[in-house]
Image (spheres, grey):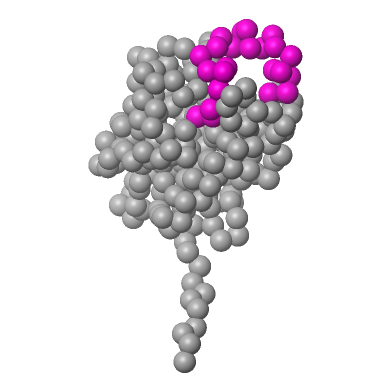
Amino acid sequence: MARARSTTTPPPTLVLLVRHGQTPTTGQVLPGRTRGLHLSETGQQQAEAAAQRIAALADGRRTFSVYASPLERTVETATPIAKALGLRVKRAKGLLEADFGEWTGAELKKLSKLPEWRSVQRNPSGFRFPGGESFTEMQTRICGELDRLRAAHPGEVVVAVSHADPIKAAVAQAMGTHLDLFQRIVISPCSVSAILYGADGPIVLAVNSTDDLRTLAPS
């Protein structure tokens, strides 16, 4: 006799998307996946503050995991968070910054003068960085990574330290917002965006938060 399939619904997973802290080039260049870029002193202070805010959620009843994009600036942001929770940082390639291809390392003020910049801002779903990744591929990648992480950690809290554009894309997907509007979302250094992934779909609890996280809860 065949066994009946389980109808048990897995408990929701809370994902805390954290942008890395400030670096010496934040707001000036498009670093992309450049190696060797570390947090500035301000960025280190931001990471420590984020660690304390996230650690305040630990009440002994929830299990935490901390993941980061493999780049130095994200790992350096995730390290104090993991330390505050008594954990170690795990690398997740799906959390990587977009591959900006030939634009990697370019100054933002020069890029903003290119005719292609309008597409980046107004029609990102139809834009591919020269020699790099498209925004659509980036969104598919990070959302796939978050699906993997929440499936691996049902009912837990997953801290995922990533980059501004991937986080914006993940938030837009969770809100049901078209990718062409994702540039309207602001993700500041070391801000936290909280998404509760459950059986009925995602619930966005916070975006770009730099405040106390202990009040996070669906209404």
Q: Position of residue 106 (x, y in %)?
A: 55, 12
| Above or below: residue 11 compared with residue 162 | below
Q: Identify the residue shown where x is 52% and y is 37%.
A: 193
Q: Identify the residue shown where x is 50% and y is 46%.
A: 146
Q: Identify the residue shown where x is 43% and y is 38%.
A: 93
Q: Position of residue 8 (x, y in %)?
A: 49, 72
The answer to whether one can see residue 122 in this image is: yes
Q: Judge whether residue 52 is colored magenta.
A: no
The answer to whether one can see residue 51 in this image is: no
Could you say which quadrant of the image residue 34 lies in?
top left
Q: In the displayed orientation, state which residue is furthest to the front.
A: 131
Q: Which residues are magenta?
A: 97-120
Toward the viewer: 100 or 17? 100
Toward the viewer: 29 or 171? 29
Q: Would you say 108 lies left or right of 94 here?
A: right
Q: Judge whether residue 108 is colored magenta.
A: yes
Toward the viewer: 66 or 110? 110
Q: Would you say 146 lies left or right of 59 here?
A: right
User: Exactly how many numbered labels are in the figure?
Assistant: 0
| Above or below: residue 216 compared with residue 210 | below
Q: Position of residue 64 (x, y in %)?
A: 35, 48
Q: Identify the residue shown where x is 41% and y is 55%.
A: 152
Could you say which quadrant of the image residue 84 lies in?
top left
Q: Position of residue 217 (x, y in %)?
A: 52, 49
